[in-house]
Image (cartoon, helix red, strand yellow):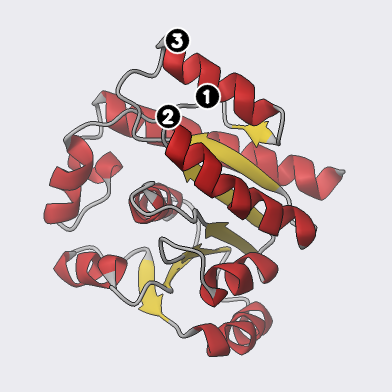
Amino acid sequence: MKVITFAAQKGGAGKSTLAKSIGTFLSENYRVLIIDLDPQGTLLDWYEQREEKNPIVTSAETKDLKEALKALSKSETYDFVIIDTQGRDYAGTSEAIKRSDVVFIPIRDSVGDTRANIKTAITAQNQKKPFAWIPNQLRNTRSIRSNELDRSLKTIGTVSPVRIAMRYDFPDAQGNGQGVTEYSPKDKSADEIKKLTKWILTFIEKIDND
């Protein structure tokens, strides 16, 4: 069982969107559980709207996370557990990172996001957890601004070569209780999520082999 955490200490980076989008695509071939640590319950609300009940979504409190993950690991029920954290610097984010095998940090192409989310990267480094940046919600995935973001992040850690653009497919899928690969499987948003998920699997495999 691999534990993946999406963390960003700046709100609005798109953690929940990536968690459900990637979790949905992974669940086509793997057993996936998503744990919603955010008290707002964004992913639980989404799950309640779904007709398809894979991936499974549940909630947990920070104090219970360690034992919950230990029990899940022993049961061998899931291949992947994805943790969605709250959008600020709080104890739950640090605890989720501590209990993870790998951490992914969604980041938008703004100075404010970069400054705030460096703290997330430092937390992962301090806990000796592999992490990677995911450029997300970009207005233009090929712009000079996006390229500059890529270059600056590479001085801190690994950056996903797959960039995710800001498109209406994502909120529309949310409103429909779907992942974007279900809602618009042939469109660009779905293609980006499929490519990102495949890259994530490769990244995890590389970690295991190092």
Q: Is residue 107 visible?
A: no
> Separation of disc 3 and disc 2 at Cα?
10 Å
Marks 2 and 1: in contact by CB < 8 Å?
yes
- Residue 58 in the figure: left or right of residue 99: left
Secondary structure of the residue carrying tag 2 is loop
Does 70 appear above or below 83? Answer: below
Residue type at tag 3: Ile
> Separation of disc 3 and disc 1 at Cα?
9 Å
Residue type at tag 2: Asp
Q: Residue at x 45, y 50 (%)?
A: 26
- The quarter in which the C terminus is drawn is top right
Residue 189 appears at what percent x and percent y? 29, 30
Q: Which residue is mark 2?
A: 109
- The quarter in which the N terminus is drawn is bottom right
Q: Residues within 10 Å of mark 1 (few under 14, many from 20)?
A: some
Residue type at tag 1: Leu
Q: Residue at x 78, y 59 (%)?
A: 126
Q: Which mark is residue 60?
A: none
Q: Which residue is mark 1?
A: 149
Q: Earlier in the sequence, mark 3 or mark 2?
A: 2
Q: Earlier in the sequence, mark 3 or mark 1?
A: 3
Secondary structure of the residue carrying tag 1 is helix
Nearer the observer, 119 or 159: 119
Q: Which residue is mark 3?
A: 144
Nearer the observer, 174 or 124: 124
Marks 2 and 3: in contact by CB < 8 Å?
no
Q: Residues within 10 Å of mark 2 (few under 14, many from 20)?
A: many
